[in-house]
Image (spheres, rainbow, N blue to C red):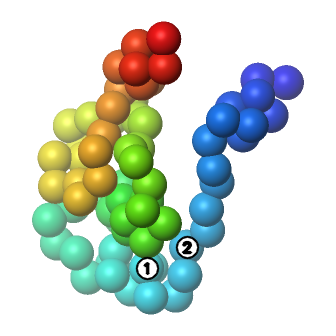
Amino acid sequence: MWLKDICRVLTVVGASHEQVLEAIENVKFKDFEDCLQDECARMVSADCLVTCNLKDFKEAKTKVYSPDEFVALLE
């Protein structure tokens, strides 16, 4: 299954209570879930986020790539 293959390369992290509160209070993001992803990535010192929705991550603290950009980096 392709999801298992992705999980062999990438790390899945959970959100803490503190991260959820920070995402709720962050008014720079229009979307709570996007902000929460950035908060989680920041807390684990992730190298980047991969998303099809680049426009909603303009305020991200983490480097953000489209799937195509990320795959190109791996090649």
Q: Is residue 46 left or right of residue 32?
A: right
**Looking at numbered disc 1 in the image, what kind of residue is underneath it?**
Gln
Q: Residue furthest right?
A: 1
Q: Residue at x 43, y 79 (%)?
A: 19
Which residue was labeled with disc 1? 19
Label 2, residues with CA under 10 Å away: few <14, some 14-19, many ≥20: few
Q: Is residue 20 visible?
A: yes
Based on the displayed image, in which of its 4 quarters is residue 61 positioned? Answer: bottom left
Residue 75, labelled with which disc?
none
Q: Secondary structure at mark 2?
A: loop
**Looking at numbered disc 2 in the image, what kind of residue is underneath it?**
Ala
How many numbered marks does the figure carry? Answer: 2
Which residue was labeled with disc 2? 15
Based on the displayed image, in which of its 4 quarters is residue 29 positioned? Answer: bottom left
Q: Is residue 68 above or below residue 32?
A: above
Q: Is residue 75 left or right of residue 64?
A: right
Q: Determine contact: label 1, label 2, CB under 8 Å.
A: yes
Image coords of residue 7 (percent x, y):
72, 40
Q: Secondary structure at mark 1?
A: helix
Image coords of residue 12 (percent x, y):
64, 54
Image coords of residue 57 (percent x, y):
24, 47
Q: Residue at x 23, y 55 (%)?
A: 60
Q: 67 or 23: nearer the eye?
A: 67
Q: Is residue 28 above or below residue 4?
A: below
Q: Is residue 13 left or right of residue 66?
A: right
Image coords of residue 48 (percent x, y):
38, 45
Q: Residue at x 63, y 50 (%)?
A: 11
Label 1, residues with CA under 10 Å away: few <14, some 14-19, many ≥20: some
Q: Residue at x 28, y 45 (%)?
A: 63
Quarter of the picture holding the N terminus: top right
